Image: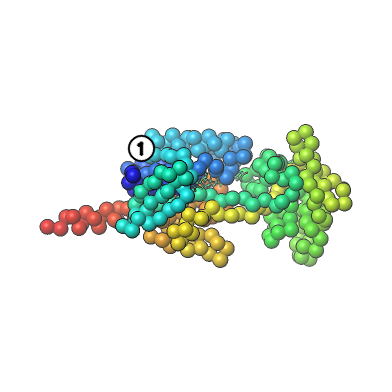
Amino acid sequence: MSQYDVAIIGGGAAGLSAALVLSRARRKIVVIDAGHPRNASAAHMHGYLSRDGLPPGELLRYGRDEVRHYGGEILDGTVTDLASDGRGGFEAGLADGRRISARRLLVTTGLRDDLPDLPGLRERWARDVLHCPYCHGHEVRDRRLGVIGGTAGSAGYAQIVRQWTHDLIYFTAPDTLTAVERSELAARGIGIVEGGIDRLVIDDDQLRGVQLHDGCVVPRDALFVPPRFVPNNRLLTGLGCGVDAAGWATTDATGRTSVAGVWAAGNVIDPRAQVITAAGAGSAAAIALNADLVDEDVRVAVRLHQP
Ligand SMILES: Cc1cc2nc3c(=O)[nH]c(=O)nc-3n(C[C@H](O)[C@H](O)[C@H](O)COP(=O)(O)OP(=O)(O)OC[C@H]3O[C@@H](n4cnc5c(N)ncnc54)[C@H](O)[C@@H]3O)c2cc1C
């Protein structure tokens, strides 16, 4: 079993960015990646300085090449369990039976987008059903847009989407809006459609509209849907890492969890992280991890140096 300085679980923007910093710091690292980054279904990635519009998979291909260039190892596989080795380090078990031993762990396993259960919606995800106006709003600017509302905060989300179009409709079940939300939506010209949604109308591989229970179809070119974000943090909670009231693992500003030697970065701890911020968080965690390893290296060196 190979002994690494750091095992990084998850090879998206956060994990690969950390791997680049650590391998350049001459640490022996491994990235284990299951190969399902969150934005895989999007054709283009936006908002990443100098790489705006790049297909998301290409960023990761460049990242993998850069990490390997500095000696970092990348394994395709799924980590199924993490455990302390009882000597201050950790062991990771992979689904195919491989085991990895490392002095420190960085978990960057991302999150899952839970979408409303509406016929046609999942199939159009990342095409004309979108969630992040900063990622895709510019591409559908001035089109006929809709927001599937009804969840907490979704009227405020519609106000943000309004930044990209004058023709916006907020769909919600009857009696879900407060008087203030209703007047704020009306004040900015956002149409309100109150009624149950039957399905999305798709024709010729394009969204055409939203069909309501009464059969009426409201024409729309694209829809914004606020998903429920679910962190892929089973490995962290299995190690005993502390979580907040909503079940998200808590860390300090560098990504250090409540369990000594275990860090986390990116969407697994922060639903708001974009690709560039996930990469930044991975980099910050890597620098803190290296400092923690250096502290241990100093302690060991001093002990061995005693006459
Ligand atoms: C449709 C869509 C479009 C988006 N477009 C944009 C955009 O244009 N611009 C932007 O900035 N952001 C965009 N985002 C957000 C972006 O996807 C995230 O910010 C980014 O993916 C977060 O990076 P991450 O490294 O934290 O997680 P991820 O990129 O999700 O990477 C996590 C990795 O961990 C792996 N993994 C999970 N569990 C395990 C395990 N047990 N063992 C091994 N590996 C594991 C996964 O397979 C995955 O490869 C979009 C999101 C979606 C859903």
Q: Is residue 8 left or right of residue 181?
A: left
Which quadrant of the figure has residue 48? top right
Q: Report if residue 25 is visible in the image.
A: no
Q: Look at label 1 and name its amino acid.
A: Gly
Q: Is residue 52 left or right of residue 187?
A: left
Q: Which of these two is toward me, 151 or 52?
A: 151
What x and y, as percent, mark residue 264? 46, 54
SS assignment at label 1:
loop
Q: How is the image coloured?
A: rainbow
Which residue is at a point 68% across and 39% down the rendered structure image? 127
The quadrant the N terminus occupies is: top left
Q: Which of these two is toward me, 160 or 301?
A: 301
Which residue is at a point 30% across and 53% down the rendered structure image? 294
Which residue is at a point 70% across and 41% down the rendered structure image? 124
Q: Cβ of disc 1 within 8 Å of ligand 1?
A: no
Q: Which of these two is toward me, 298 or 93?
A: 93
Where is ligand 1, by quadrant?
A: top right
What x and y, as percent, mark residue 19? 41, 44
Which residue is at a point 74% across and 52% down the rendered structure image? 148
The residue sitting at the left extreme is 307
Above/below status of 307 relative to 32: below
What x and y, as percent, mark residue 123? 70, 41
Q: Which of these two is toward me, 256 or 237?
A: 237
Q: Which residue is mark 1?
A: 71
The quadrant the C terminus occupies is: bottom left
